[in-house]
Structure formats: C-alpha cells, structure tokens
Image (cartoon, grey):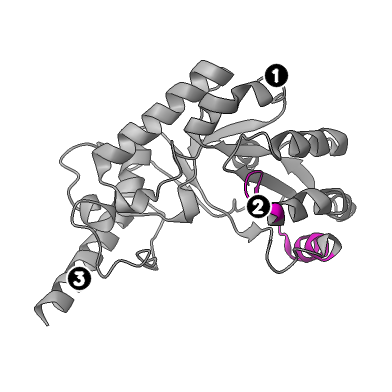
Amino acid sequence: MEGISRRRLLRGVGLAAAGAATGAVGVTEVPRWCGWDHPPLSGGYAAAADNQGAVGTSSVHIRYFVETSRPLVALTFDDGPAPRYTPWFLDALEEAGVPATFFMVGRNVRDHSGLVKDRLDGHEVGNHSWAHRDLATMDLPQIQDDLRRTREIIEEKLGRTPTLMRPPFGHLGGSTVLAADSLGYDVVLWDRQMRERRFKDDPAGQAKDLVDTVRPGSIILAHDVGDERRLVALEALKDLVTGLKARGFEFVTVSGLISRQ
C-alpha cells in the first residue's frame, strides 16, 4: 500500500507541476511509463515538482494542433536526416511544392547534414533531441543539455536556430516541459499521423484517410527515417497534397501555422 500511495502522490504532484509550467495548457492524462513500474524519482513528472528556480516564467505552449478557422495544415517529419529516405522526401516535397517541418535528431545532423544543408529553403527545422532517447525518463539538467547540444549542431551545420521541439515518441514528462520553457522552445506534438502499419501496402488508402480527417490547424506526423513502412508517407504524398488542396487547404510550416492562427 505504501508503494501505491507513493506512486499516486508522485503522479499527482507531477501533473500539478506540469500544468503550472504550461500556463493555460492543461495536462489531463498521464502517459504510460515505458514499462516502468513507477515514475523515476529523478526525471519525468517527479522532476517537474523540483524546479528549483530553473524556470522563471510559464510561457511554453504545447500544441497538438493550432486552433484556427483558416484551411491550413502542417506536414512534419521526424528522426532525420539520413541517407536512406530523407533525400527522397525532399524530392517529393519539392515536386509537390509544399513546405514541411523537419524535427531532426542531433547526431543525425552531425553525421548527415550534407544531405539537407542546401535543400531546406521553405522548410523548417525543429529540435528532436540528440539521440532519440525518451526524455520523460531523464531529469531536467540532462534534458537541457540534450536539447542545447542538438540546437548547437543544427546551428553549426545548417545555420538554423530551432524554436520548436518535439519529444521522441511524443512522451512528455514534466521535466521536458520545464526544459523546453527554460530554453525558449514551444512543444509540438500532432493530431494526425501516417498510419504506417495499417496502410503499409495501401498508400492511396493512407492519403484518403488523412484527406478525409484533416481539419484546419492539423499537424500531421510522418517519418523520413526507419524501416520500409515509412515509405507509405512518400507514396501517399502526391495524393495527400492533391486531395487537401482540392478541399482548399494550404500547406505551411508549423511556425507558419502558429503565426497565421
């Protein structure tokens, strides 16, 4: 009973702290702890209750989508850059004439920046951590160091300063919220995604699924790194763009979506 009470206490404190850190953005659900029996005492929600003055404001925004009546949509890609698929996605986006936001992994930028350095006109770059570790299992100083390191390599190799970050796996612990706020990031998740398992062999079905369900302000998740399932996004892209443009939608970056809400 003592262990159960302790876990409930930690989760409750963390929710309150995460809510405070996000200002008007409420946290209404506790995510699973990736197989852990309890939240880590030095990370995630527990760390959110141990701010110790690291964050002096409550200005971070957490967005799954952007509330707007304008027919705007943002396409995002996670985990690159990498040789296997990233150039193909850039080719397809150029052919379709649409911008995207790439949430890049720091070590991949270090190793493969040449693939994208001169191909990002019109696109946006966001921070997706250094090595795609689960930030919700790390404490505040670790996350701050991780995000700073990633920002520095993006600035060095690509000449961009990211203002948006996306936590790997979409896992969002309280310490991640505090780290994002202390470094001036807004947190971007998603409300629509490429269903790579379901539509692995049906790119037309994937395109239709999104064309039928995207709403004004939607943020779509895709990946430009991984196994062959990722290619459904590539194969569905032309029909997705054609279908959404037929509905009157305009593709913008996430920052463009936020600025035009």
Residue 184 drawn at (x, y percent): 40, 33
Stretch in magenta:
205-228
Looking at marks 2 and 3 on the same chain, the residue that comes earlier in the sequence is marked by 3
212 or 91, nearer to the observer = 91
Numbered disc 1: secondary structure: loop
Residue 188 drawn at (x, y percent): 52, 47
Residues at marks 2 and 3, CA–CA distance in whole angstroms: 37 Å
**Residue designated by label 3:** 7
Rendered residue at 86%/39% (across/down): 96
Amino acid type at mark 2: Asp
**Residue designated by label 2:** 227
Amino acid type at mark 1: Asp
Q: Is residue 219 above or below residue 125?
A: below
Q: Nearer the viewer, mark 2 or mark 3?
A: 2
Numbered disc 2: secondary structure: loop
Outermost residue toward the bottom? 1
Looking at marks 3 and 1 on the same chain, the residue that comes earlier in the sequence is marked by 3
